[in-house]
Image (tube, grey):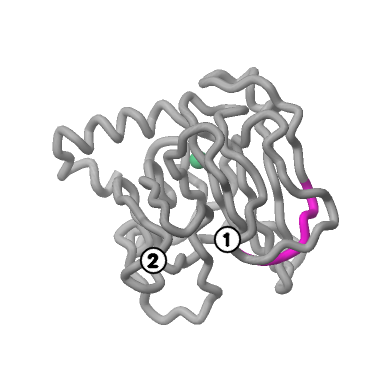
Amino acid sequence: MFYTMKLSRVNFVVVLFSVAISGCVATNSTQRKAIKDLQKGRVTEDTSYVYALPFEKGTAHLVVQGYYSAYSHKNRAAIDFKMKRGTKITAARGGVVVRLKEDGKRGGLNNKYRQDGNLVVIQHSDGSRAGYWHLQENGVLVNIGDTVQQGQVIGLSGKTGYSALPHLHFLVWNNRSNQWQQVPTRFQTSEGPKYLRPFRKYSNK
Ligand SMILES: [Zn+2]
């Protein structure tokens, strides 16, 4: 919404791509100013945890959809990383595996595929959880109850579920007052801790 005004032709293509992929169910809403800051990658006063990029060191991936984008992340604090099928997904933060699915075979831009998305959910020491979505069939490389370290390979990306093209949908939930809420998180980037922005490529150094 906020960046459509300045679209170059290249970005326009990326936007079309973004429209085509992903999707989940809307939940929360956040203040407009805060959302704008996040979309611009601004970090002000923030002592929150800094996550690692969820892919192997030495690799880089394009963010095709960021926080609260006007497309399928309108009410979501989620990030989409463009990723070829079979790309190794690593834990952005250590924790315990609390949920997984890897028997999904189908994917596409149709509601009938929503239940087919393969996933891993990891619970962190502060009670928050991270979700990694759209993994390929049998692409989960951890088990429920496993303790995983930050940077450990946990799965292989794909395009199962509601997804037109291969990508990783990453999100974090906090549990405040017994209510799960999606929250934006900072990532360690080559330029320091940042909220990630769409149409930028981030490398895990
Ligand atoms: Zn997504």
Residue 198, x across and y down, in percent: 34, 48
Callout 1 environment at 10 Å: few (<14), some (14 to 19), or many (20+)? many
Task: Write down the region rendered in magenta.
Answer: 93-99
Looking at the rendering, which quadrant does residue 127 occupy? bottom right
CB of mark 1 near ligand 1 (< 8 Å): no
Q: Looking at the rendering, in which quadrant would you find the N terminus?
A: top left
Label drawn at residue 189:
2
Residue 91, x across and y down, in percent: 62, 58
Query: Can residue 80 be found in the magenta stretch?
Result: no
| In this view, 111 is above or below 94 | above
Q: Looking at the rendering, in which quadrant would you find the C terminus?
A: bottom left
Label drawn at residue 162:
none
Callout 2 environment at 10 Å: few (<14), some (14 to 19), or many (20+)? some
| In this view, 47 is above or below 72 | below
Identity of the residue drawn at 65% across and 44% down: 155
- Determine if residue 25 is in view: no
Q: Type of residue at label 2?
A: Thr
Disc with the residue nearer the chain's start (2 vs 1)? 1
Residue corresponding to mark 1: 92
Residue 95, x across and y down, in percent: 72, 65
Looking at the rendering, which quadrant does residue 145 occupy? bottom right
| In this view, 76 is above or below 11 | below
Q: Nearer the viewer, residue 166 or 169?
A: 166
